[in-house]
Image (cartoon, helix red, strand yellow):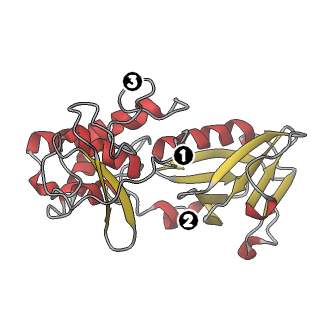
Amino acid sequence: MPEGDTVWQTARRLHDALAGKVLTRSDLRVPKYATADLTGRTVLDVTPRGKHLLTRIEGGLTLHSHLRMDGSWKVYANGRRWTGGPSHQIRVILGNADSTAVGYRLPVLDLLRTADEQRAVGHLGPDLLGPDWDPEQALANLLADPARPLGEAVLDQRNLAGIGNVYKSELCFLLGATPWLPIGALPADRAAKLPSLAKKLLEANRDRPVRTTTGRRGQDLFVYGRAPRPCLRCHTSVRVADQGDGSRERPTYWCPNCQAGPAPSPTRPRTTPRRTTN
C-alpha cells in the first residue's frame, strides 16, 4: 500500500522517465482538465512530498497527484503494452519521445500553478524523506495533543508526512506501545526517538522492492498482517482491530505481550493483506 517510501520510489521512476524531456502526449482524463494540453512543454522535475507527487512542468504548472489506496503510476517504453489496468481506470497520460507515464485510479489529480503548490501540500508536517525534515518540529507536532492515541497521531500527515497504516503498526510495535496508548503517556525516552525511528524505517525501504521492518527474509513485518500468527519476538498471537478517528477505520495490528497500553477487543482475524511492493 502506498506510503512515503512507495511514493518516493514512484517519484524517482517518473523523474527518470520525464524530467528534462518535452511532452509529445498529454491526456488528463478528469472533467475539470479535459481540455488542458501540456504537449510541447518540458517536464522540469517530479518531487515527492509525503504521500503526494508534484510533477512540475515548464510554464509554471504543477500536476499534483495522490495515490491513496489504489492509485498507481506506471512507466512504459514507447511501443510496450500497458498493463496497469483497463483503459477506463486511466486518469492521466504523459508521454515523450522515449516513454509514457500512465496514472491509474488516481483519486486526486489537480493541475495548478507551481506558485500555488502550498494549496495542495502546505498542510503537511515535516517530510520523513524530504529536505525539510525537522525531527524536533515533528515531535512537537505529535505531542501537541497528548491525549490522542499514538496510532492516530503518527498517521496524521499534519504532524509528520509519510507514514501509512503499515508503518503505523510496525512503529508502535518497535516502540513497545499499543496504537491506542495516548501519545502523552508514551515514556519520554521512547517519544523522543519516535521521529528518528520513523525516518530510519522509511529510509531503509525507499530503495527496496519489498518493504521490510525485520530484516528477515520471508518474515518482512513484525505485526502488520500477521494476526493470528505468533509474534516474531515472543510468539504470542498477534491481534487485529480497527482504529480510526471516525472518518475512516483502519485494520491495526499489535502484540498484546510486547506492547503496553490500552487496546480494544480483537476483531475476527483477517485474511493476510496482499504483500505490496514499494
Disc 3: CA contacts within 10 A as few (<14), some (14-19) or many (>=20): few
Q: Which mark is residue 216?
A: 3
Q: Secondary structure at mark 3?
A: loop
Give the vertical position of 229 relative to 141 (above or below): above
| Residue depicted at x 29% and y 31% | 232
Q: Amino acid at mark 2?
A: Asp
Q: Are marks 1 and 2 in contact (CB under 8 Å)?
A: no
Q: Amino acid at mark 3?
A: Arg
Asked if residue 8 can be seen in this view, the reply is yes
In front: label 3 or label 2: 3
Q: Which mark is residue 116?
A: 2
User: Which of marks 3 and 1 precedes in the sequence?
Assistant: 1
Residue most toward the right? 79
Q: CA distance from mark 3 to mark 2?
A: 44 Å
Q: CA distance from mark 1 to mark 2?
A: 21 Å
| Residue depicted at x 73% and y 47% | 43
Residue position marked by numbered label 1 in the rendering: 7
> For residue 265, which quarter of the picture?
bottom left
Q: Which one is in front, 46 or 89?
A: 89
Count of numbered badges drawn on the protein: 3
Q: Amino acid at mark 1?
A: Val
User: Which of marks 2 and 3 precedes in the sequence?
Assistant: 2
| Left or right of residue 229, residue 175 in this image | left
